[in-house]
């Protein structure tokens, strides 16, 4: 039997003791909002969603497809409790940054300010005509493909434009944050993303994983890894306000 309360107490004390905490999140924090994990998405929907050709040639069809398959869950189900708790942790000064591979903008929508979206997101838009950038998580929430307010050109989002490449400005922020972290919370993600930030974790950092399964983080400084076994996101959400994230900084 796993003593979750003891684990939560440890985690709580780690959060209290840390003066610089960074969360690393992935698909697991968004699935309870009904957002499909891209790895398990229907290949046709994924290809359509990631096609700038369709976006340019048939914006109406593109919007319909991307809304049905992805954006509806983002805007209608909204951020999960996990996103909200992380935003609350930041607001009381106990979380200095979130590094995410998610492109759904839900950390920003939940109110987090320091979010490094290392693969870009639907908030990061470029005008296909004049090149102007628009950083707004709600641009795609208005019922059709957004247009550039300056020139009327179509906007494309970073992950579509760059085929899920790395968004360098946020990669740089991610590295800076994680290299300062005393505590790294790994939540709902399968593992490090191609060494983008993983190699920058300090040897002295504590790493707490909130993942139901083993991940690549298991091999990193194993003796420090606090793995919350069988800790489902549902349990995480139920417990957070009880013993995990009291909204009072330690004194
Ligand atoms: Zn423009």
Image (cartoon, helix red, strand yellow):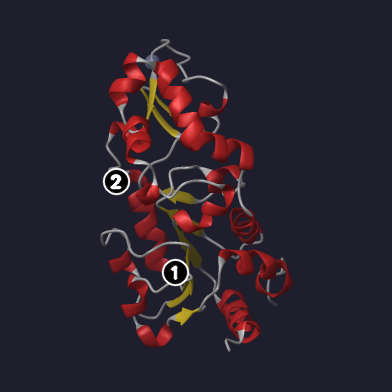
Q: Distance between the residues labelled 1 and 2?
A: 22 Å
Residue shown at 27% from the left, 36% from the top: 162
- Using residue 63 as the reference point, say whether residue 81 is left or right of it: right
Nearest to the eye among marks 1 and 2: give it.
Answer: 2
User: How many callouts does the rendering have?
Assistant: 2
- Indicate which quadrant contains ligand 1: top left
Q: In the depicted view, which residue is nearer to us: 127 or 191? A: 191
Image x and y of residue 118, in percent: 37, 49
- Using residue 216 as the reference point, say whether residue 2 is left or right of it: right
Confirm if mark 1 falls within 8 A of ligand 1. Answer: no
Q: Name the residue under label 1.
A: 181
Quick check: can you spot residue 129?
no
- Using residue 99 as the reference point, say whether residue 232 is left or right of it: right
How many residues crowd around disc 2 within 10 Å: few (fewer than 14), some, or many (20 or more)?
some
Whether 132 is drawn above or below 83: the answer is above
- Disc sitting over residue 28 in the figure: none
Element at badge 2?
Answer: loop
- Disc sitting over residue 166 in the figure: 2
Q: In the depicted view, which residue is nearer to us: 81 or 89? A: 81
Q: Which quadrant of the figure has residue 5?
A: bottom right
Image x and y of residue 160, in percent: 33, 33
First-in-chain label (1 vs 2): 2
Q: In the depicted view, which residue is nearer to us: 75 or 248? A: 75
Residue shown at 51% from the left, 46% from the top: 35
Whether 166 is drawn above or below 186: the answer is above
1 and 2 marks in contact (CB < 8 Å): no
Check the image and name the residue furthest to the top.
Answer: 151
- Using residue 148 as the reference point, say whether residue 129 is left or right of it: left
Element at badge 1?
Answer: loop
How many residues crowd around disc 1 within 10 Å: few (fewer than 14), some, or many (20 or more)?
many
Image x and y of residue 143, in percent: 56, 21
């Amino acid at each position: 039997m796993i003593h979750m309360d003891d684990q939560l107490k440890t985690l709580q004390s780690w959060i209290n003791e840390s003066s610089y905490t960074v969360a690393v999140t992935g698909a697991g924090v968004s699935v309870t909002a009904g957002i499909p994990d891209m790895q398990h998405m229907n290949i046709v929907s994924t290809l359509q969603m990631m096609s700038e050709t369709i976006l340019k040639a048939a914006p109406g069809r593109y919007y319909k497809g991307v809304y049905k398959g992805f954006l509806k869950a983002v805007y209608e189900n909204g951020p999960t409790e996990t996103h909200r708790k992380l935003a609350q942790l930041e607001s009381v000064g106990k979380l200095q940054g979130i590094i995410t591979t998610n492109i759904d903008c839900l950390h920003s929508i939940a109110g987090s300010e320091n979010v490094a979206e290392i693969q870009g997101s639907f908030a990061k838009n470029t005008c296909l005509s004049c090149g102007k950038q628009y950083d707004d998580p709600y641009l795609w929430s208005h019922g059709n493909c957004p247009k550039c307010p300056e020139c009327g050109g179509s906007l494309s989002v970073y992950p579509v434009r760059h085929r899920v490449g790395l968004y360098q400005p946020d990669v740089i922020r991610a590295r800076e944050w994680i290299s300062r972290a005393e505590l790294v919370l790994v939540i709902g993600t399968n593992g490090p993303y191609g060494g983008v930030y993983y190699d920058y974790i300090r040897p002295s950092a504590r790493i707490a994983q909130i993942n139901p399964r083993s991940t690549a983080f298991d091999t990193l400084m194993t003796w420090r890894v606090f793995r919350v076994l069988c800790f489902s996101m549902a349990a995480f959400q139920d417990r957070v306000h009880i013993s995990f994230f009291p909204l009072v900084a330690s004194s």
